Image (tube, helix red, strand yellow):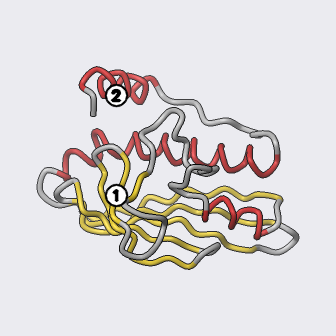
Amino acid sequence: MLVRNLHTRRLAADTADVAALLDSLSSEDDRLWPWASWPPMRFDRTLSIGARGGHGPIRYTVAEYEPGRRVRFRFDAPKGFDGYHEFRVDECPSGITELNHLLAMEARGRAHLTWPLFFRTLQDALLEECLDKAEMAITGEVRTPYRRTPYQRTLLRIIARVGI
């Protein structure tokens, strides 16, 4: 099963300011990842090509990194996630900067079931909350904050009990 999952936020901001958010990923001063309510993104070293880590049960390696522009993570786990996810900062006309997150993979084996039933809905919530955090950091407000669905809240309660 081919999967393409894109999340985008257009921000009325200087590209350099959004780039700084991207470059703070997994640092002590991470201003992009919603670590207060999700497993933090952690690596075995600073954000750089070859750094290994992930968040919760999702494991990946930094495959490409262009500071301030793009970081691509190649999946290592769970099994059957063959592909990558990446953050990208794009300058647009009229002082707008776009922050994008793309997940592109081939779901194989058990991932045919776990992706649509479990991981996708959590991915959607995590990424929208990530983009909310970016919008708050850049503008001081979030125009339309993301609200978790009842299914997402149920899954997160189960995860909390199990300790994933």
Q: Residue at x 65, y 44 (%)?
A: 133
Q: Secondary structure at mark 1?
A: strand
Indicate which label's residue lies in the foreground, 2 or 1: 1
Label 1 Cα crowd, 10 Å radius (few <14 / some 14-19 / many 20+):
many
Image quadrant holding the N terminus, namely bottom left
Image quadrant holding the C terminus, namely top left
Q: Nearer the viewer, residue 1 or 13?
A: 13
Q: In the rendered structure, which disc, 2 or 1, sits on the residue that comes first in sequence?
A: 1
Amino acid type, callout 2 = Leu
Amino acid type, callout 1 = Gly
Label 2 Cα crowd, 10 Å radius (few <14 / some 14-19 / many 20+):
some
Q: Position of residue 23 (x, y in %)?
A: 61, 65
Could you say which quadrant of the image residue 136 lies in? top right
Q: Position of residue 147 (x, y in %)?
A: 58, 30
Image vertical order of residue 159 relative to residue 128, above or below: above
Q: Residue at x 48, y 66 (%)?
A: 47
Q: CB atoms at circles 2 and 1 under 8 Å apart?
A: no
Q: CA distance from mark 2 to mark 1?
A: 23 Å
Q: Nearer the viewer, residue 12 or 161?
A: 161
Report the side of 38 relative to 106 (left or right): right
Q: Position of residue 52 (x, y in %)?
A: 33, 64
Q: Which residue is tagged 2?
A: 155
Q: Position of residue 25 (x, y in %)?
A: 55, 57
Image vertical order of residue 85 relative to residue 56, above or below: below
Q: Residue at x 80, y 66 (%)?
A: 96
Q: Which residue is tagged 1?
A: 53
Q: Which mark is residue 61?
A: none
Q: Secondary structure at mark 2?
A: helix
Report the side of 138 relative to 1 (left or right): right
In the current view of this chain or complex, which residue is farthest to the right? 94
Q: Residue at x 30, y 23 (%)?
A: 158
